[in-house]
Amino acid sequence: MARAQGARSQLAVAFESTYGTPPAGSFTRLPFASSTLSAEQPLLSSELLGYGRDPLAPIKDAITADGDLSVPIDAEAFGFWLKAAFGAPVTTGTGPYVHEFRSGNWSLPSIAIETGMPEVPRYAMYSGVMLNQLSWTLQRSGLLTATVRLIAQGETVTTTSQAGTLADFELIRFGHFNGSVERNGAALGNVVSAQLTYSNNLDRIETIRADGMIDGADPTIAALTGQIEVRFADSTLVQQAISGTPCALQFSYELPAGQSLTLTAHAVYLPRPRIEISGPAGVQASFDWQAARDPVTGRMATITLTNDIEGY
């Protein structure tokens, strides 16, 4: 009997034209490192009395379909997740193409995602998938991956794939070595690590339905937050925190062949941090920053992806 192995699993994705209705084909295989995307339905213990010490049979509770994906940050496939998070980009150029994703869209696309385990076989199709949160960390070394947090309308399991013939992106990964952090257009020194999280703060529409699915997941007020860990070498960031003025933070990756990814938070506010001396080693300070709408650009964030893909 065959046993399921993660090494043989696959992830097929496609944007939906109608929420909750997977397209008939046009799926693309995307790279991923791990997945917790699944449906679950807990049991409710019986509260009834009068039948002795042994409980009566439990009943089924509501179905929840959600989970996280760990995906590489690369020059091509990552644009799919950026479109899910921010909406369709504004694309310019004739190759290379520059895709500009902007925060603030009220209408976000839904996705159909199929996870396949051919050994069993088990193919789970998740329809009406919305991206709730996208986060990653910049650091000196290690593999560069992002966490994608998803909310799905429901799950359908079959023994054969419904995704058809899959298209592929070329895997061109960014690495931590390719990363940089800038403040107001100038390199920000002494950064040990930086973490950022963009959240759509989706509101599940949990209406009463015979199939147990939700009616949708609507975006509310977005949030872009993070943390910067710096070696304490000057008072620039501390003075900004004290004054309460915003700055622009830019997190970038660039490959020698010209592919690049840049996230710009246009108006970032810093809290006044606690400066601690914990021993003989260097002193570090952590800033839990928050981004807000910039009155000049009219938005909170802009993400620019440069590659050879004509459109998403």
Image (tube, rainbow, N blue to C red):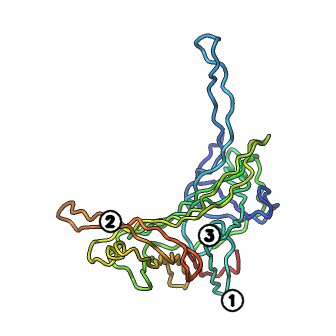
Q: Secondary structure at mark 3?
A: helix
**Looking at the image, residue 84 lies above or below residue 237:** above
Q: Are marks 2 and 3 in contact (CB under 8 Å)?
A: no
| Mark 1 or mark 2, earlier in chain | 1
**Looking at the image, residue 89 lies above or below residue 158:** below
Which residue, as the protein is rendered here, is positioned at the far front? 243
Q: Secondary structure at mark 1?
A: loop
Q: Which mark is residue 62?
A: none
Q: Amino acid at mark 1?
A: Thr
Dividing the image into 4 quarters, which one contains the C terminus? bottom right
Give whichever of 71, 172 is nearer the camera: 71
Q: Amino acid at mark 2?
A: Pro
Question: Which residue is the site of mark 3?
Answer: 82
Dividing the image into 4 quarters, which one contains the N terminus? top right
| Mark 2 or mark 3, earlier in chain | 3
Residue 262 x, y percent position in the rendering: 53, 78
| Mark 3 or mark 1, earlier in chain | 3
Q: Amino acid at mark 3?
A: Leu
Question: Which residue is the site of mark 2?
Answer: 273
Give whichever of 162, 17 is nearer the camera: 17
- Residue 107 in the figure: left or right of residue 82: right
Residue 174 x, y percent position in the rendering: 51, 74
Neighbor class of circle 3 (other Cα within 10 Å; few <14, some 14-19, many 20+) is: many
Instruction: Kindly indicate the quadrant of the structure image that contains residue 147.
Output: bottom right
Instruction: Kindly indicate the quadrant of the structure image that contains residue 96.
Output: bottom right
Residue 23 x, y percent position in the rendering: 80, 61
Q: Secondary structure at mark 2?
A: loop
Give whichever of 89, 173 is nearer the camera: 89
Question: Which residue is the site of mark 1?
Answer: 94
